[in-house]
Amino acid sequence: MSQTKMTGYRDGVPELIAAHGLGEETAEALLALDLAMFQYARRVAKGEWVAFILRRIEADLEMVQFQALASVARRCTPGKGGDVTWATVGDLAEEMQITPSRASRLAAELVSRGYLRRGAAQDDGRKSYLEPTAKAGRFLARFRKEKWDFMLSIYDSWPEDDIRTFARLYERYTSAVQERMTEDGETRAES
């Protein structure tokens, strides 16, 4: 029976980092950053961050219902002269990357719970739009406040200069990742 050598996740990485001319302390910092970013991305992907905030405000919405409500709210934007661009079930399906029938069921659930209302489009009576209700506005305001109260509490012991530096460097990092991925043909740049 042959033995396959199990390799560790970090095997060879310090050497790769050193080959780029970076020191041992920098290698350890980058490895720690890699782990922290993995853990954070996993929490976000699993929805733990939003679920945590929803629990804190004792929301009566499930995660997918919240996502649908947030999607509709993002699509409903005021324009020039007070006009509003309303969301449709098709917009909801597109943003959430779900089927139109699933989007329609979610919209119906939110309408029945008082978070959305349906209206007839002015330009085409066969078409309906989705509009967040006052209840949705109050709920989203509570969510935003709790989210920002929690986020800001994380920075309580940080000097403002550190907060600005972190924000600048994180934005610089994510922009560089997007730029490199676009250069390598992995993603398309939005125009």
Image (tube, rainbow, N blue to C red):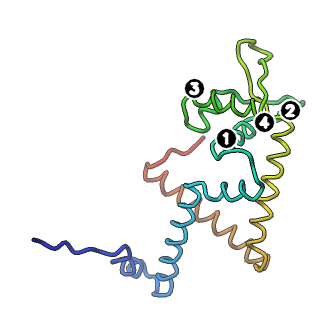
Which element is circle 3 on?
helix
Q: Nearer the viewer, residue 177 or 151?
A: 151
Corner quadrant of residue 108:
top right
* Residue at mark 4 to residue at mark 2: CA–CA distance: 25 Å
- The N terminus, quarter of image: bottom left
Please tell me whether mark 2 sits on a helix, a strand or a loop. helix
**Looking at the image, residue 1 lies above or below residue 24:** above
Label 2 and label 1: CA atoms lie apart by: 30 Å
Q: Quadrant of the C terminus?
A: top right
Q: Which residue is mark 1?
A: 65
Mark 2 vs 1, N-terminal side: 1
For mark 2, what is the residue? 80
Amino acid at pointer 2:
Lys
Front disc: 2 or 1: 1
* Circle 4 crowding by C-alpha within 10 Å: few under 14, some 14–19, many from 20: many
Residue 101's label in the rendered image is 3
Give how far apart the Cα atoms at labels 1 and 3 are: 15 Å
For the residues labelled 4 and 2, say whether their Cβ atoms are less than 8 Å apart.
no
The 10 Å Cα crowd at callout 3, few under 14, some 14 to 19, many 20 or more, is few
Q: Label for residue 115?
A: 4
At horizontal 59% and vertical 33% (from top left) the residue drawn is: 94
- The reply to whether discs 1 and 4 touch (Cβ–Cβ < 8 Å) is yes
| Residue at 85%, 28% in the rendered image | 83
